[in-house]
Image (cartoon, grey):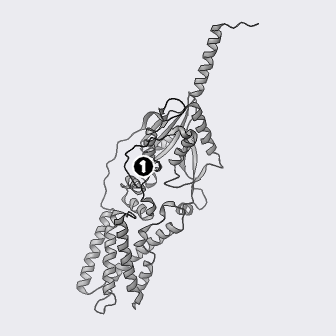
Amino acid sequence: MISISKTTVFVFLLIIMGLTQAKAQIYEISLLTCDPGKELYSSFGHSAIRMREIGSEGQDLVFNFGTFDFRTPNFYGKFATGKLDYMLSVSTYADFIREYDYYRRDVREQILALNSEQMDFLIQHLWAQYDPARRYYRYDFFFNNCATKIRDAFEISLGNQLVWNDPPKSEEKTFRNLIDEYVYPLPWADLGIDLALGSVIDRNATEREKQFLPDYMEAAFANASIEGDGPTRPLVKESRVILEYPDEEFKMDFLNPYFIFWVIAILFTAITFYGHRKKRLFLGLDLGLFSILGILGLVVTFLWLFTDHSATKWNWNILWVFPGHLVLVWGLMKKALQPWVRKYLLFALIMADAAVVFWILGWQSFHPSLIPILLVIILRTNYLYYNLGSKTLKST
């Protein structure tokens, strides 16, 4: 019969407890938040999950939901129609940080207070999502992007134990307001986005919906807590700065839509006044103006009706950039004035006025730089409606 002393049993228990604790601390899970870059595709920032295996030779990996494959067949066609699939990729932490260091973009890390069971569940979920059959997903800028996929992964792994603790008096912001915060330094891109996206983004976003932006998700993680597996504790147990660079001062140059569109409006007004004095129409102005508006109308129509983009629906920019303006151009080029042309001018005038009404009533927010363009449309449709066909005015 073997005799085991109390000391031996005590030492054995200590060893078992030590091994259990070591296993529980084998991983460190954290959220990486990267500041916006200078280009449009990077202007909203980025998020990723870091999985660091404790130990001198442990793996240090980054799970990144914000990648896509340029080799995808019909890449640009799928991108334009909203049918491009993004994918989950895995890289080393060193490679991930090297890229952001090269582009001088700040990176912050939030180390999360997950227990061993929660970490294991999350890691298994991420590797399951990385399976070639599951790593691709249909991208949606607002509701299914690199940040929301991370949030969803944590909600799946933690379930009801994850509590977001939304601030009680947060500022109400529409999706368009949230975008504007990031694209203001890129005024032409800001204009293009406001032209392409419809009234569906002019509703207030909930605190959870704001997490489509990495900065807002970082703030949500900082407020969140874990409950139900012991004492309530903050989700984030430590925050640290990985990369930090001085902020660059923003200066808007003169080649921005605000300045250029007002210059155009002043020129149109001056030429219209001069034409009124000299009994001339200057139809060349209108051929150029309505050609551009008609082409933009085709783009807006295509994005609204023929793509899978959820944010391009119900776009009331169609009231002033209308494909039918191309028919007006054709009518103005005819030597003999067609009776329908004046009727169409009245229609175009009413449509432009309606756009202003929609804007004032808050049914859709248009880009502020468009005020002078809407004034030009109202001015020229009025002028042509009352003077087109007059025997005392010349067309050129």
Q: Secondary structure at mark 1?
A: loop
- Residue 313 sits above or below residue 40 on the image: below
Location of the N terminus (image quadrant): top right
- Residue 70 sits above or below residue 124 on the image: below
Camera sees residue 334: no
Residue 369's image quarter? bottom left
Give the percent coordinates (x, y) of residue 30: 50, 37
Give the percent coordinates (x, y) of residue 73: 61, 60
- Residue 60 sits above or below residue 354 on the image: above
Give the percent coordinates (x, y) of residue 165: 44, 40
Give the percent coordinates (x, y) of residue 31: 49, 39
Report crowding for label 1: few under 14, some 14 to 19, many 20 or more residues within 10 A (C-alpha).
some
How many numbered discs?
Answer: 1
Residue 367's image quarter? bottom left
- Residue 265 sits above or below residue 200 on the image: below
Camera sees residue 168: yes
Which residue sits at x=54%, y=65%?
Answer: 307
The three-letter code of the residue at mark 1 reads: Gly
Location of the C terminus (image quadrant): bottom left
Which residue sits at x=57%, y=40%?
Answer: 157
